[in-house]
Amino acid sequence: MTMISRSSAALVLTGALFAAGCSEKPQSPAEKMAAASVPGAPPDGAKDLAAKEVTESEVKLSNDLVEFAYAYPREAARIPDLAAWLDNDREKQREALIKTAKRDKDDAEKNGFPYHPHSHLQTWKRVASTPRFLSLSAEIDTYMGGAHGMHSFDSLVWDRNHAKRLKPLDLFESGEAFDRAVNDDLCAGVERAKAAKGIDWSRDPDSSFGQCPSASAQTIWLGSTDGKYLDRMTIAIAPYEVGPYAEGSYTINLPVTAAVVHALKDEYQRDFLPIN
């Protein structure tokens, strides 16, 4: 009879256990969610896990009545409250588009005119993500049956410290304070951008587009170069604001200066980094 020593038997058992451990499959997302949902699991564990698993969101609809698209990035999708707001905004935009399109199609058919599908195409993108803020920009193309479509912009800032959605202008003492800090730089930027297009900007106050736009009335995008502080911004200007439709839109990059930081509300000043 062959005898196996205790040490040999231990090695065999250890090898078997190691092989069994290596053969185990990693938990699936559903299994992870189930484990995070059992009694005694950390509060919000399932919610946090679900947020980590999500990807960017994009919804599209195209038919004879409308063309609709609405997208936002993964960084926004991973914040449940922000994603819920974006989903709600998406549905409001979709429903409004369909309602208007149905009305206009009925009117066109009654009057013997051709109907052209209406559209709303909106894409949110990350501008910056700092420890406190997620800054998003949106570009929106719409067509409602007229001679041409329209290009516009939007923005938002998510404050992680307070789980709150803000508009960039909400971070400043007032629109007037923001204008005092940036309007001169904005006007100079618009003039340079027009010159780059070969356009001589008439600053005659009596001309149709002679007035410099107010920065606070435009769309503001807040950015970061280091991922720690907000230290740059862009003013997005839609068609017709500083020129005819054919001239298109403008995006003017501006520095975050000491004057800009001074115009901020006190609670936000430490989150910005001026260039001087």
Image: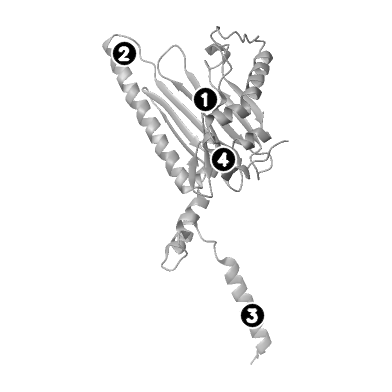
Query: Along the line of sight, which residue is nearer the eye, 226 or 14?
Result: 226
Q: Nearer the viewer, mark 2 or mark 4?
A: 4
* Residue underneath mark 1: 217
Position above or below: 245 against 35: above
- The amino acid pointed to by label 2 is Ala
* Residue underneath mark 3: 12
The label shown at residue 265 is 4
Q: Disc 1 and disc 2: Cα gap in Å?
A: 35 Å
Q: Position of residue 177 (x, y in %)?
A: 57, 31
Q: Position of residue 112 (x, y in %)?
A: 29, 8
Position above or below: 17 against 251: below
Q: Position of residue 153 (x, y in %)?
A: 52, 27
Position above or below: 57 against 187: below
Q: Nearer the viewer, mark 3 or mark 4?
A: 4
User: CB of mark 1 within 8 Å of CB of mark 2?
Assistant: no
Secondary structure at badge 3 equals: helix
| Rendered residue at 47%/44% (across/down) | 82
- The amino acid pointed to by label 4 is Lys
N-terminal of the two: label 2 or label 4?
2
Look at the image and name its color scheme.
one colour
Secondary structure at badge 2 equals: helix
| Rendered residue at 46%/43% (across/down) | 83
* Residue underneath mark 2: 108
Q: Disc 2 and disc 4: Cα gap in Å?
A: 51 Å
User: CB of mark 3 within 8 Å of CB of mark 4?
Assistant: no
- Badge 4: how crowded within 10 Å, few (<14), some, or many (20+)? some
Quadrant housing the C terminus? top right
| Rendered residue at 45%/39% (across/down) | 86
Q: Disc 3 and disc 4: Cα gap in Å?
A: 69 Å
- Badge 2: how crowded within 10 Å, few (<14), some, or many (20+)? some
Q: Disc 3 and disc 2: Cα gap in Å?
A: 83 Å
Q: Disc 4 and disc 1: Cα gap in Å?
A: 19 Å
